[in-house]
Amino acid sequence: METRLLRTDREVGIIGYGAYIPRYRLPATEVARIWTGGEGETPVTEKAVAGPDEDVVTISIEAARNALARAGNVDPALIRAVWVGSESHPYAVKPTSTILAEAIGATPYVQAGDWEFACKAGTEALQAAIGFVGSGMGRYALAVGADTAQARPGDALEYTAASGGAAYLVGPAEEALAVVEGSLSYVTDTPDFWRRAYQHYPSHGGRFTGEPAYFKHIAEAARALMEALGTTPADYDYAVFHQPNVKFPQTVARQLGFKPEQIGAGLLADRIGNTYAGSSLIGLTAILDGARPDQRILLVSFGSGAGSDAISLRTTEAIRERQGRAPATQDYIARRTVIDYGLYVRFRGKLRV
Amino acid sequence: MGLPSKNWRLRNQRYRLVGEICEKCGTPIFPPRDVCPECEGPAQTPYVFSGRGEVYSYSTVYHPPAEFERYAPYTVALVRLEEGPMLTAQLTDVAPEEVYIGMPVEMVTRQLQTEGDEGVIAYGYKFRPLIR
Ligand SMILES: [Zn+2]
């Protein structure tokens, strides 16, 4: 069983973390007003929408600055990798990561690259950063998950496809605010959701989206990690799962044996929507904002196509002094300007003339 | 090709407010100009500004040039950085009627302009009301 784990040569952890959520909110009632005459239940209350001058680059920059502020005295020139996971990189060819690396002062002696794996691209970058630091290739690596997700107007995903991101500075365990206890990945070829080249909007495989995709991958990854580490749900103070809506993470948590109070702090979908590659990673920032030393956290992402990354963390004494060095995730959630469907269409460039 | 090369040349000051500090009298300088405006001494030591400041004066643009149309209406402000220098920048994440003289602001890096659907995206500093 232990061989299923992704193992590092030396202990690593999170040195700094940071979130970014844009100011604008589109209430689900606005989407319903346009497309269903206001009838029917909605999967979230509202979602975060990027403003007209925002994209995955700008979201990543602010999240990364917050992560570096929490890290304190880390010289950006010591960061040896800057990786951004997203399905909405602003360029098809030209890395987001080089712009981010330049903006935080990490250039030029730095590995940079963009990662893609639907909503799991961010935790993919985080897994890689854990391995990079854990092998000794560099002292610090920065991993970001961010998206400005687009849904076809009128599609069910339009209620939830949102914008936001989170950044994690990974480094040696002795400097960490949360130590990585272990991680693994679980992937299969499952056609639940995709977007072909040059298409603006994604397509999804109806009956493939729930049971064989989201629930199967998250549950298998979570169970395998806990089995390998010898932990049970009762050993965790918090858990956070990918949140395409409110119900899915609640359901998978219940199936695995987690209680509602373990997932409450990190379950943000009702107020910010599904931030895709940012989703579980932003949820983790909200948990870290309120966590105390020596608490255990389980994170399990999900990306269509399909796969999950599961990571087990334990907080350290260092978390106390770092929490307040940057805006809390709830500060960004509280900063809120409601827009109507018309302004949303304009902001997200859905009007093509 | 004016936009890519100009933005590339200025990327340190545009992305993260890198200016200079005067080696002779200690004046922080932005934008960097290699000669101190106070004592005319050489100023070549790079200095990263905190990004905090306040609105000194402002004006709202309702009919912008074509490349800025998607931001309209927006406010352009003269911002006094907490270290002293004054600079002109677009405000963001704020409605024009919310802006006032003395408003505390902080620097964010945002899209400045894009050359249509095919060209380069220029990023640089804007200022917004403090998050907290
Ligand atoms: Zn001088």
Image (cartoon, coloured by chain):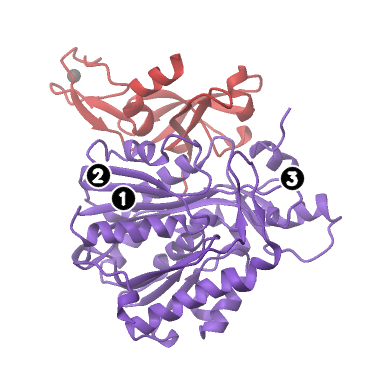
Chain colours: A purple, B red
Measure how far apart labels 1 and 3 are at the Cα level: 35 Å
Farthest left residue in view: B24
Q: Are dots 3 and 2 on a single chain? A: yes
Question: Residue shown at 63%/53% (left/top)?
Answer: A161
Q: Which mark is residue A76?
A: 2
Upstream in the sequence, badge 1 or badge 3? 1
Q: Which mark is residue A341?
A: 3
Q: Are marks 1 and 2 on the same chain?
A: yes
The percent coordinates of residue A30 (x first, y second) are 76, 52
Q: Are marks 1 and 3 in contact (CB under 8 Å)?
A: no
> Mark 1 touching mark 2, by CB under 8 A?
yes
The spot of residue A299 in percent (x, y) is: 43, 70
Ligand 1 - quadrant of the structure image: top left
Cα separation, mark 1 vs mark 2, equals 8 Å
What residue is drawn where x is 60% and y is 78%? A251
Q: Please say whether residue A15 is visible from this viewpoint.
A: no
Q: Is mark 3 within 8 Å of ligand 1?
A: no
The residue lying toward the viewer, choosing from B116 and A227, is A227
Q: Chain of mark 2?
A: A
Helix, strand or loop at mark 1: helix
Q: Is mark 1 within 8 Å of ligand 1?
A: no
Residue A252 against residue A342 in the figure, above or below: below
Q: What amino acid is found at the position of numbered circle 3 in the picture?
A: Tyr
| Residue A197, image quadrant | top right
Most extreme residue toward the right is: A37
Q: Is residue A280 left or right of residue B96?
A: left
Give the amino acid type for the residue marked by disc 2 in the picture. Answer: Pro
